Image (cartoon, rainbow, N blue to C red):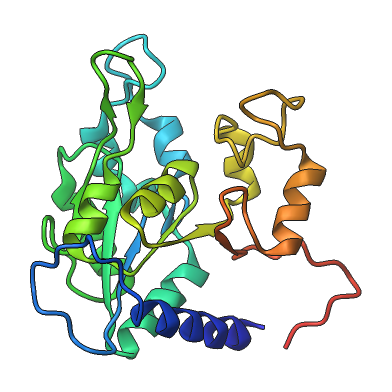
C-alpha cells in the first residue's frame, strides 16, 4: 500500500515539476528533476496536540499561547508522525529538497529546528529550510489570513503538504499543488474549528461536513478544495481491506 502511494506520488510530482507556475521567483537556479517539497509542521510532521494543550497562555484569549514555550517543548510533548517522516526520507533519498513552513510565531524557533534535525536525521535550520510564517490580520476587515503562500512562492516549492484549510489555501494562492495530510482523530477532537476537520458539530454554513461526509472525502481521495488527500492513518480501512 505504502509503495503504491509513493509511486503514485512520484508520478504526480514529476508531472507537476514539468509544469511550474510562472509567477514563482526562485532564489536559486532550479535543478532539472529536483523537486522542492514543503511541509507544514503541526499535525503534519509532528503530532503536537499535547504540547499545545500544556502550553501557558499569554492572556485570556484562548489563541494567545506562549509560543516561545511551545517551540521549546516539542522534545517533551510532540511526537513525530512516522508515515510523513518516511515520506520526507524518501523525497531526500531521491535528491529532492524538503522545507518546513509553520504558522507558529518564531520565538525559540531554534529549538524546533534542533528537534526536527534530531528526529528526522538531517540538518534543519531556521530561515534556511525551516520558516516561521504566522498568520496576519487585515487591519480593515479584521480577518486573519495565512502568509505561507509568500514563502511557498519565494522558495519556489512545487508541492505543499499540510493538514489545515489554510495550508491548502496557501498552496492554491501560490499556484502549487496542495496535499492534505489527514489529521489524527485525537487532533480532530481537540481542534474542531478547521473547516474540513470540523466533523463533530452539526453542519453549519462555515463547517458543513459531518463525519459521514468526512469519510466520503477520505474514500474519494479528494478534499473540499480539490486537493489530494494523503491518509496517513488507517481510519478508512475496514476488515475487508487488504494491505500490500
Ligand atoms: Mg498544521
Q: Which residue does the image show at 66% across and 24% down from the upper left?
A: 205
Q: Which residue does the image show at 77% across and 37% down from the upper left?
A: 210
Residue 209 vertical placement versus 20 (above, below): above
Q: In the image, 241: left or right of 219?
A: right
Badge count: 0
Q: Quadrant of the N terminus?
A: bottom right
Q: Quadrant of residue 86?
A: bottom left
Residue 235 in view here: no
Q: Quadrant of the C terminus?
A: bottom right
Q: Nearer the viewer, residue 123 or 31?
A: 31
Residue 20 vertical placement versus 25 (above, below): below
Residue 12 vertical placement versus 230 (above, below): below
Residue 79 in view here: yes
Q: Which residue does the image show at 36% across and 21% down from the upper left?
A: 143
Residue extending farthest to the top is 60
In the image, residue 182 lies at what x, y percent?
A: 58, 55
Residue 29 vertical placement versus 51 (above, below): below
Q: Which residue does the image show at 13% across and 62% down from the upper left?
A: 125
In the image, residue 56 lies at what x, y percent?
A: 33, 24
In the image, residue 26 lies at what x, y percent?
A: 14, 67
Residue extending farthest to the left is 28
Q: In the image, 66: left or right of 45?
A: left
Q: Quadrant of residue 70?
A: top left
Q: In the image, 3: left or right of 176?
A: right
Residue extending farthest to the right is 240
In the image, residue 22 lies at what x, y percent?
A: 25, 66
Amino acid at each position: 500500500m505504502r509503495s503504491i502511494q509513493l509511486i503514485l506520488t512520484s508520478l504526480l510530482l514529476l508531472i507537476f515539476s514539468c509544469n511550474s507556475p510562472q509567477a514563482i521567483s526562485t532564489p536559486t537556479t532550479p535543478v532539472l528533476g529536483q523537486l522542492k517539497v514543503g511541509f507544514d509542521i503541526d499535525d503534519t510532521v509532528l503530532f503536537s496536540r499535547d504540547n499545545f494543550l500544556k502550553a501557558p497562555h499569554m492572556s485570556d484569549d484562548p489563541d494567545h499561547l506562549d509560543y516561545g514555550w511551545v517551540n521549546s517543548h516539542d522534545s517533551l510533548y510532540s511526537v513525530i508522525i512516522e508515515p510523513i517522516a518516511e515520506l520526507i526520507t524518501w523525497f531526500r533519498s531521491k535528491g529532492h529538497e524538503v522545507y518546513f513552513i509553520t504558522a507558529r510565531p518564531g520565538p525559540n524557533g531554534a529549538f524546533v529546528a534542533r528537534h526536527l534535525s534530531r528526529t528526522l536525521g538531517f540538518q534543519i535550520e531556521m530561515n534556511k529550510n525551516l520558516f516561521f510564517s504566522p498568520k496576519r490580520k487585515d487591519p480593515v476587515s479584521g480577518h486573519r489570513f495565512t502568509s505561507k503562500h509568500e514563502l511557498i512562492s519565494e522558495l519556489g516549492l512545487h508541492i505543499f503538504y499540510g493538514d489545515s484549510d489554510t495550508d491548502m489555501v496557501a498552496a492554491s494562492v501560490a499556484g502549487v499543488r496542495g496535499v492534505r495530510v489527514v489529521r489524527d482523530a485525537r487532533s480532530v477532537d481537540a481542534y474542531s474549528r478547521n473547516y474540513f476537520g470540523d466533523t463533530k458539530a452539526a453542519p453549519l454554513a462555515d463547517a458543513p461536513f459531518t463525519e459521514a461526509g468526512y469519510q466520503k472525502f477520505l474514500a474519494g481521495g479528494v478534499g473540499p478544495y480539490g486537493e489530494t488527500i494523503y491518509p496517513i492513518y488507517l481510519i478508512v480501512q475496514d476488515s475487508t481491506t487488504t494491505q500490500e
